[in-house]
Image (cartoon, rainbow, N blue to C red):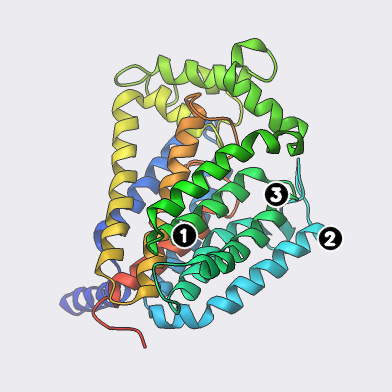
Amino acid sequence: MSALLRWTRELFDRLFEKVDLPLLLALMALMVVSLVVLASASGENTRLVVSQGARFGVGLVALLLLSRVTPAKFRLWTPLAYAGSLVLLAAVFVFGTGRSANLWLNLGVFYLQPGELLKLTVPMMLAWYLHSVPLPPGWRVLAVCACIIGVPVAMIVLQPDLGTGMLVAASGVFAIFLAGIAWWRIGLFAGLGLAALPAAWPFLLPHQRERILTFMNPENDPLGAGWNIIQSKIAIGSGGLTGKGWGQGSQSHLDFLPEHTTDFVFSVLSEEFGWAGVVTVLALYLFVVGRCLWIATQARDGFARLLAGTLAMTFSVYVVVNGGMVAGLLPVVGVPMPLVSFGGTSAVSLLVGFGMVMSVHAHRKFMAS
């Protein structure tokens, strides 16, 4: 028995020696929340819950493996990873499939959404490039960064997938921000962006315009375009302090709430677990983001520091956008709540990103060559 216990302990130490346990435990807590909420939202659909659990399993294995890889190797692989993701993204225009837009590649065993890969490879490529140039970035460096960001974002928007395109763009902007861009340049770009908004309106697709108009006044079409957000706000408000209880959410179980296992799963959580459940989950998200930013500050290498910091800030955007969307504070753009919503490759890609962050933590004492 003692030999078995010793072998088990040695195996545990080997598997988790490179892992930041506080971050891993917080991520696993979010996964448990996801499985519990999805079990209720899906009407105890075992197949859906098992499918989500399988994604978590694959992602955790990737996380453990990547945490053992040095940031220097990630930097070496970055140009190839970025180029490969662009090739896969281009393949979507020829071989893509999907319900409302051709966003996926059918690989036989599973469906791959190349746009999800760009959420990782764009920050990696920017960190790779910015690591080798003088900082803070000047105009020439910013022009190159704009190309690194702009090419994949334009391809994603043309699919069309505006929500993913905005998130990829945000990941790139965060990398430039962490590289120390001057505040006056930030103000200049922000002003130009605001000034360009009216000019962008004619180029939006009809359903994109409808989402913005519905966000401004959902009650204008309560049984049509405004239905989703109205039902979501009813679900959130009816949860009260402690919620109605697991499996007792009327909005999802009576099919008032659309997409209640994907985009609006956070509304289900709000209705069934109330304010207490929402605060608990948001506290977990805050801890994850804060821990990743702390890991970034401990990095001894510019590439590792930019990569970990950018992934942390991009993760926070997913939370803010989905939370604002389901609460009626932002337009509905189809961004899922990270590690809680069901579907796609997002759970796996997020855990891959956290594996790279843990790699930065594990090798923080060594300066990458």
Q: Is residue 46 left or right of residue 15?
A: right
Callout 1: 10 Å neighbours few (<14), some, many (20+)? Answer: some
Residue appearing at x 28%, y 48% in the figure: 287
Q: Nearer the viewer, residue 251 or 358?
A: 358
Q: Nearer the viewer, residue 241 or 321?
A: 321
Q: Amino acid at mark 1?
A: Gly
Residue that carries the numbered disc 2 in the rendered image: 94
Q: Which is nearer the N-term, disc 2 or disc 1?
A: 1
Place of residue 247 in the rendered image (x, y in percent of width and height, measured from the top left)? 45, 25
Q: Alpha carbon of mark 3 to alpha carbon of mark 2: how far?
A: 16 Å
Q: Secondary structure at mark 1?
A: helix
Q: Amino acid at mark 3?
A: Val
Q: Alpha carbon of mark 2 to alpha carbon of mark 1: how far?
A: 31 Å
Q: Is residue 32 left or right of residue 142?
A: left
Q: Nearer the viewer, residue 85 or 52?
A: 85
Q: Amino acid at mark 2?
A: Val
Residue appearing at x 38%, y 18% in the figure: 239
Q: Nearer the viewer, residue 260 or 79?
A: 79
Residue appearing at x 41%, y 57% in the figure: 177
Q: Alpha carbon of mark 1 to alpha carbon of mark 3: how far?
A: 31 Å
Residue that carries the numbered disc 3 in the rendered image: 157
